[in-house]
Image: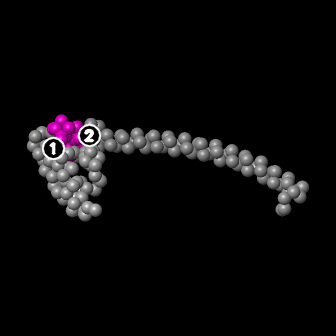
Amino acid sequence: MANGAQIAEKNFQRFVKWISAKTNADFKALERRGLLNRTEIFRECGFARSVLSQNPRIKARLQKLEAELRVQGVLPLENEGNEGDVSAESPLGETGAHKRMVGSARLFRLEQDNAALLQENAELKRQLSKFTMLQNALSLTGRIPR
């Protein structure tokens, strides 16, 4: 059974192997908001998301890699495009639009579910009233105790 240090070393070796297998074009495709997409990294490396932030060697190597990629021009410089304005082209604007779209889809789905539940509720009330009348008739005739 492997201890924490052995697992950390194994994860670091996986990460280094993953880096060596990538080209600049691959890293460019993984770019998201000026950084490498962490979700894709941990998926491709086959370890948990927390490894990227909790393993100090991987964290340092990732920061070094991103700095190297900025120098090579693969990733944008850190201060590029950070003037604080949120335009339609910026990732923040896209995120807001995406949230609104997801919110609208969720609202539509909830409205559909609500309408279906209201219809089901009305049907169940109709059946209940039918059975209530039947129970009253049976208790009046003495077939079930009151």
Give me the residue at 17% from left, 49% from top.
Answer: 16
Whether residue 80 appears in this view of the structure is no
Give me the residue at 32% from left, 43% from top.
Answer: 95
- Considering the numbered disc 1 on the image, is that residue within a helix, a strand or a loop? helix
Going by the picture, which residue comes out furthest to the right? 141
Classify 10 Å Cα crowding around label 1: few (below 14), some (14-19), many (20 and above). few
Amino acid at the residue labelled 2: Ser
- Considering the numbered disc 2 on the image, is that residue within a helix, a strand or a loop? loop
Numbered disc total: 2
Quadrant, the C terminus: bottom right
Mark 1, residue position: 20
Apparent side of residue 111 relative to residue 45 in the rendered image (left or right): right
Apparent side of residue 124 relative to residue 88 in the rendered image (left or right): right
Between disc 2 and disc 1, the foreground one is 1
Whether residue 90 appears in this view of the structure is yes
Query: Which quarter of the picture shows residue 144?
Result: bottom right
Give the extent of the magenta segment.
19-35
Mark 2, residue position: 90
Instruction: State the image coordinates of residue 9 (x, y, percent, origin top left).
Output: 19, 57
Q: Nearer the viewer, residue 48 or 96?
A: 48
Q: Nearer the viewer, residue 69 or 5?
A: 5
Quadrant, the N terminus: bottom left
Instruction: State the image coordinates of residue 53 (x, y, percent, origin top left).
Output: 24, 56
